[in-house]
Image (spheres, coloured by chain):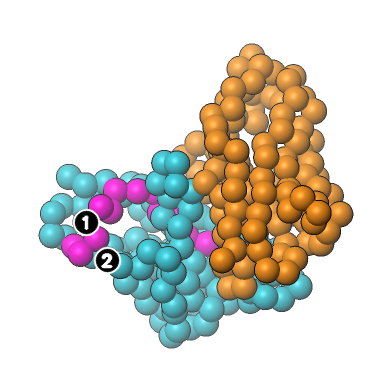
Chain colours: A cyan, B orange
Amino acid sequence: DGGITQSPKYLFRKEGQNVTLSCEQNLNHDAMYWYRQDPGQGLRLIYYSQIVNDFQKGDIAEGYSVSREKKESFPLTVTSAQKNPTAFYLCASSIKPGTERYSNQPQHFGDGTRLSIL
Amino acid sequence: GDSVTQMEGPVTLSEEACLTINCTYTATGYPSLFWYVQYPGEGLQLLLKATKADDKGSNKGFEATYRKETTSFHLEKGSVQVSDSAVYFCALEAGTALIFGKGTTLSVSS
């Protein structure tokens, strides 16, 4: 079955350390997204990518970095510059946004990675 | 800019009670509207959608109608079950991404 796989499910970061969250999809989707979820805050967009080798900052990109070297993969690095990284991180993918098909088949989500500070 | 406002929770109901979770939006034009559900420890799943005014989305006994005149997309269910306990997110399509409300936690007890 097609879907989105996020790993690991739980991750711990030490002070001053960079950590990378994995997101892989086999839905043949062009677009991929990273969201951060905090209690009572809903989902906030970190980065998104509509095509390989291209990505854009979302609303809260500071302290994060991404790459999109393959269509299937969109890893997120939480750098030491992110001072409050404890959150639940969700990856999503979709067909090309802004099309009629997108409205009928919006974003599909992975099961998330919970990041905590040691 | 575009935004979504949901009623704050938590909402606590007994099994078989009626549910309404309010959602209003601010947007340019007429975006598609969605409700997503998140069960504990999981990602979000699309629950239902409406792509134009007066459309009614429905799934698993849940319904929501796209009301252009009141810019609303309230989620309703006539009889909730314990298994409906989850966080519910209203969202609208905004170009390249979705804009989500803050989520409403529903707890249903038997």
Question: Across the whole image, how many numbered discs are drawn on residues?
Answer: 2
Q: Classify mark 1: helix, strand or loop.
A: loop
The residue positioned 67% from the left and 40% from the top of the image is B22
- Disc number placed over residue A63 in the picture, else none: 2
Can the viewer see residue A3?
no
Q: CA distance from mark 1 to mark 2?
A: 8 Å
Q: Classify mark 2: helix, strand or loop.
A: loop
- Residue B7 x, y percent position in the rendering: 60, 38
Q: Residue at the far top: name it.
A: B110
The residue positioned 71% from the left and 57% from the top of the image is B33
- Residue A115 x, y percent position in the rendering: 31, 49
The residue positioned 30% from the left and 67% from the top of the image is A62
Residue on which the image places disc 1: A83
Quadrant of the image containing the C terminus of chain A: top left
Q: Residue at the far left: name it.
A: A16
- The relative height of residue A69 versus residue A115 in the rendered view (above or below) is below
The residue positioned 45% from the left and 41% from the top of the image is A40
- Disc number placed over residue B87 in the picture, else none: none
The magenta segment: A80-92
Q: Residue at the far bottom: name it.
A: A53
- The relative height of residue A61 versus residue B107 in the rendered view (above or below) is below
Along the viewing direction, whichever of A24 and A67 lies nearer the viewer: A67
